[in-house]
Amino acid sequence: MAVAKLEQLSQSVVQDPSMATGAVPAMDWMDIPVTFKPGNYAYPAKKDKVEYLDSQKGLHFPNAREWSPEDDDWKLPENWKEIIIDGLGERLEKFRSLKIFMDCCVRCGACADKCHFYLGTGDPKNMPVLRAELLRSVYRNDFTLAGKILGKMAGGREMTVGVLKEWFMYSYQCTECRRCSVFCPYGIDTAEVTMMLRELLHLVGIGINWILEPVSNSNRTGNHMGLQPHTFKDNVDFLAEDVENLTGIKIEPTFNRKGAEILFITPSADVFAEPGLYTAMGYLILFEHIGIDYTWSTYASEGGNFGLFTNNEAMKKLNAKMYAEAERLGVKFIIGGECGHMWRVLHQYMDTMNGPADFLELPRSPLTGTIFENAASTKMVHISEFTADLIKHGKLNLDKSRNSHVKATYHDSCNPARAMGLMDEPRYILDHVVDWVEMPENTIREQTFCCGSGTGLNTDEIMELRMRSGLPRANAVKYVEDKHGVNMLSCVCAIDRATLTSLMDYWNPNVGVCGITELVGNAIVLEGETRGELDEGLRTMVF
Amino acid sequence: MKYGLPLVAVIGLILIAWLGSMIPGMQYFFGVAVPYLAVMVFLGGFVYRVVQWGKSPVPFSIQTTCGQAKSLDFVKHNRLESPHTTSEVVARMALEILTFRSLFRNTKSELHDGPKITYESSKWLWLFALVFHYSFLVIVIRHMRLFLNPVPDFIVWLDWADSMFEIGTPALYLTDAGLLIGLIYLFTRRFTNRQVRYISLSSDYFPLLLLIAIGVTGVLMRMFLRAGIDIAAIKQLGVGLVTFSPTITTDIGSIFYIHLFLVCALLVYFPFSKLMHLGGVFLSPTRNMKNDTRQVRHINPWNPDIKVHAYSAYEDEFREFMVDAGIPVEKEPEPEEEAPAEAPA
């Protein structure tokens, strides 16, 4: 799918008639059907991936088949409607959040213009309130007294194939970033609604390949890229060689090593693709510098959890590897790398799903002696927490001038900001390693804007949609680029490193993207190093 | 249509009470039977809804953190926006419920050529919502004087404070004005803000119109249509209702029955509508949970038993690659058996 030229899209966002630009659709939203065409949907999951997942114990991904959203017939099971309504009923019994969020919305509209998808597409169904109404209308019709009696007058509507298609369209135009939930007077969280919609869709075999293939890879090979153990190790070894070429220091990372003190888990994308690679090099340099006793794992080689984007069961099954591996290797605690949704799972779900991790010890920094009380039960520490503590105690030999080619700004990744409250640790680190500035206040911290491609939407076939939904973030970066000459967008998320790169290439081509630990690694003065002038830090090509 | 039907419904309710209360003998129906029924439905319905919510567990701790979490000693913890203890949660909830904290954050975004997106503070909704809700609360408390004998001092004081500016005769209650101004703003906004108008349902217009009708009939009764409004008789009925010995001794003007009937309609409608946000706001998991989930394990009562894809299965699939790459394994590969020699021809 060709993406619109920058000028076209720039005009289209502002001038094309849309809800966001001031036009109001003539028809009621319930009467506007969805139309699928190339570019506005992500490809459905491949049959063999769905079959594999459905064959795994504890997982349920039925109705594997070849199908296309553009077809009239989605080859749904005969009793699809019953499955959906029963599935909704079951989830209402399991999640108080869902019940409350279905019942309490007063449609005040405070959330309406808080969504990056709405701002970029102007589509009224991308207003969080209306996205939730897509489900709420069915809920009212089938589960509330008012809806059963008054039907459409009470805002109810019957579940139809058209509604199902609408669910598919709009639950995959939401990145579960939770920005709307910050502004809602009742804390209604669209992420909960979207998660339920996606769970329900999976019950009848509707899912996208960009999510289900990574889920299946993660389950089988340990990481979403599908890297087999030897390949994963090779990739990390290559990065260690790159570090040696740059600094003269030979690093020998270990894998699956029993008896290590710390297990380190980070998103596999960081050992596989630019610019995450440089963040991974940063990890290697950091750990070498402080000399901790740690190991990588090829079995638990994925920090990210694409299960979160499908259903609770898949999320639990994938996440379970972390504790299983930590127990097998006999480590004391776990450090997790930079990743957004990974940390939502680790902070809000892991201990509940797969804890208690009583075979691990209270996380204690081997260098500073700091005990990470905030991770006392989960026993998993965020790399930014760990690094900030090291800097505070003067354990890192940093030369900030090594990042003098960088003028950075910082993108709060949605989940660390809004599902964890990790905001000032990365900022503290940045203060010590680079010259940086904040973006405007309505676009950072808890009000941060999503990259536009989270929750498994960073697939190329919906590139224009991604460039639209990423516009609010890109626009804030543009502001500091123009005002302060920012040339680097730093973040603590592997998906961001991939998606923001595409976003910057499109909207702000002079701005690069990096992880915080890349900047840390580049600023570290290693003992015995023979590092020359590296104009572009860890990105410098050395021959 | 979305506002037409609710308007017709409210007018219908007014007509029912107006005409009905003029039929001899129906005063007891509108003055006693309907209020009892309405209160029963309200209380029963409200409790039922809250119990229904309570029956569903909170499987995961899904707080929305709106500030820095409690973390390292030198990182300043935002106790109100990312609460770590029960008392901090109580404070966050109090701020939310008493001051509409989240609504206070509201911004209005605009798209400009460039493209350029701007966000400006937009606090009108917050302000008028606050004016409406607090006015409504004071009005409800004030009305308790009609049901209590003797009237508690604080209600007497509240009544005095509410009418202290002595505008008009009898003095206009500030909260009556606040209620109506708030409602008119909310109604106008729903009508004129294109986004809100597009998402509005009949069930959004109906309670607004009903409340406006309640406010207007209340003000009319107090300020203008005073004929036949025997406050002593009304109080006698009110006290009678709460002591389960209601009596209606004189004729009371229709406006009173209309006002009362509309209030009863609101009570009956309440538990089955979005007005239940009054209860729901206390139970919202993104707001009322502690952000301590890595420190204290949250229990999911239905945590499914799902086994991990075992390491042994992983090693079985990739053992040879692992050994070749020098990655430690649990089980050494079995020595390769020599291929059996082909049978001689």
Image (tube, coloured by chain):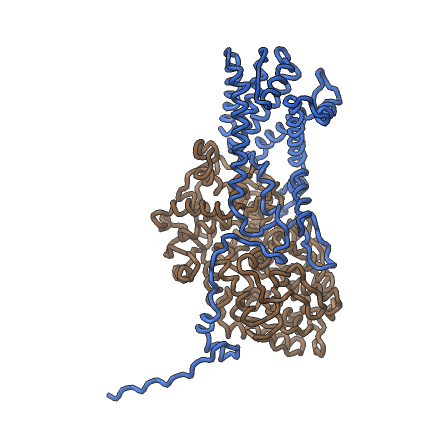
Chain colours: A brown, B blue
Q: Is residue A539 above or below residue B320?
A: above
Q: Residue lying farthest bottom?
A: B344
Q: Nearer the viewer, residue A296 or A459?
A: A296
- The percent coordinates of residue A64 (x first, y second) are 38, 57
- The percent coordinates of residue B131 (x first, y second) are 67, 31
- The percent coordinates of residue B151 (x first, y second) are 69, 23
Q: Nearer the viewer, residue A153 or B24?
A: B24
Residue at image point 49% right, 76% down: B330
* Count of residue discs: 0
Q: Is residue B124 above or below residue B11?
A: below
Q: Is residue A255 above or below residue A499?
A: below
Residue at image point 59% right, 36% down: B278
Q: Is residue A502 visible?
A: no
Q: Is residue A81 left or right of residue B17?
A: left
Q: Quadrant of the C terminus of chain A?
A: bottom right
- The percent coordinates of residue A355 (x first, y second) are 55, 60
Q: Is residue A343 visible?
A: yes
